[in-house]
Amino acid sequence: MQYKDYSKEQLAAEYEQLKQQFEDYKALGLKLNMARGCPGQEQLHLSLPMLDILHSDSDCRTEDGSDCRNYGVLEGIPECKRMMAAMLEVDPEMVMVGGNSSLNMMFDTIACFMNKPVVEGLPAWYEVKDRKFLCPVPGYDRHFSITEYFGFEMINVPMTWDGPDMDVVEELIKDPSVKGIWCVPKYSNPQGITYSDETVRRFANLKPAAKDFRIMWDDAYCIHDLTDTPDHLISIMQECKKTGNIDLPICFCSTSKITFPGSGVAAMAASDNNMKILKNKYKYQTIGYDKINMLRHVRFFGDFDGIMAHMKKHRAILEPRFNLVVDKIEKNLTGLGFTNYLKPNGGYFVCVDVMEGTAKRVVALCKEAGVTLTYAGATYPYGKDPHDSNIRIAPTFPELDELDKAMDVFCVCTRLAAVEKLLGK
């Protein structure tokens, strides 16, 4: 029976019951954290042997004889470029391997284009006073923070089950002050949606009024599958080659959620024109990133097939966690008529839409009961969810028994907030 069909007496009884459950959870003194998509301890242990993989002078040399302990090799060592190119489905010549953070490379890319013209003859972005950036929502808060930091007006683009609403995108890019769009194309953060073939091809066929419009293609979860029927994402770079729009996308990935978030390897791929601008910045910024870490990763995995084998171990750890979250939602919330969610085939999050106008209350109640969630509104630019309904759940960090308790708390708080709203409390 859905809450909308409850009488006031039934709602009042439901409130008293939920309130008591809530107080019982508070009394447990829980301290559980589902705020961010951090790998759990079991996942981190998988990569520990990497730390002992280099022992001698010869171990520290690349296939071309370069000594990884010394300066140089701005673009990254060749064998690591090949491995990351396979992850991004691009040619190795298009790849630059950076430090441990793809987010840092994204920030650097925006910073570079702010100060240097992206296309010869056009002003740098900082000179465009009404500059705008498109933001598929719900989306990744750290993407939005970057463009907010650089003074862009951020424009919401609604997500569909096929990716961003391309009718909206195609209309908005008629404005020459719109300079780019953020994309997480496979297992999107937070919904877990993978862009359809049609959506990717429409991106590749875009004809923006701004010749310096760029697609920031953050392929963070490109190999983070959780089922035997993983989603398939076609290559944006290959599609853009077909349409002659090779300068449109700049692609990013990392091993942050594959090996160690603080010590992974990041990479980006871009056309010759884009990479020329970016490398001209990087050559002043660094003499070369951590080549020893690049080499460690290559020696540990061997090649891209080795990475994929490693990801099966991650799946074995994560799949039960995601199944638990979905089971709890289905058993405790879906029949009540106000909760929507998508069971993802991969990625790092489960996205839940609770009753409109209650997300902040749900998060506050959970915190009061000892469960920390990502703050309500985080999945929208400026932290402003217009419906106050979207909540991002990160199941990866807690132990399975802790996650079980945390989801019980979440479900009770979600129901309690809904009943409060219906009763006008």
Image (spheres, rainbow, N blue to C red):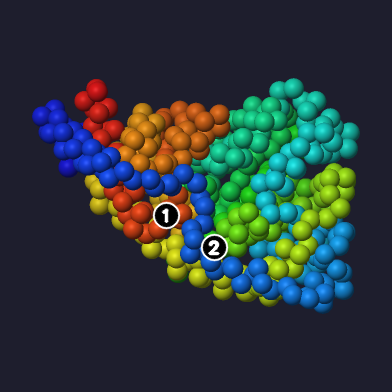
Point out the tag, 1 or 2, that comes first from the N-terminus: 2
Determine the residue positioned at 43% across, 47% down.
34
Three-letter code for the amino acid on which mark 2 is drawn? Leu
Determine the residue positioned at 63% across, 60% down.
255
Q: Are marks 1 and 2 in contact (CB under 8 Å)?
A: no
Three-letter code for the amino acid on which mark 1 is drawn? Pro
Determine the residue positioned at 67% across, 31% down.
149
Residue 223 in percent (x, y) is at 57, 63
Determine which of the numbered discs, if any, sits on residue 69 in the image.
Answer: none
Residue 199 in percent (x, y) is at 58, 49
What whole-number distance in Å separates the C-alpha atoms at marks 1 and 2? 13 Å
Q: Specify whether 226 is left or right of 417.
A: right
Q: Quadrant of residue 27?
A: top left
- Quadrant containing the C terminus is top left
Residue 62 in percent (x, y) is at 82, 72
Instruction: Please rate how many residues cluster around mark 1, counting C-alpha atoms within 10 Å: few if below 14, some from 14 to 19, many from 20.
Output: some
**Is there any visible trace of residue 317 in the rendered image?**
yes
Q: Which residue is mark 2?
A: 44
Q: Which residue is mark 1?
A: 398
Q: Quadrant of residue 121?
A: top right
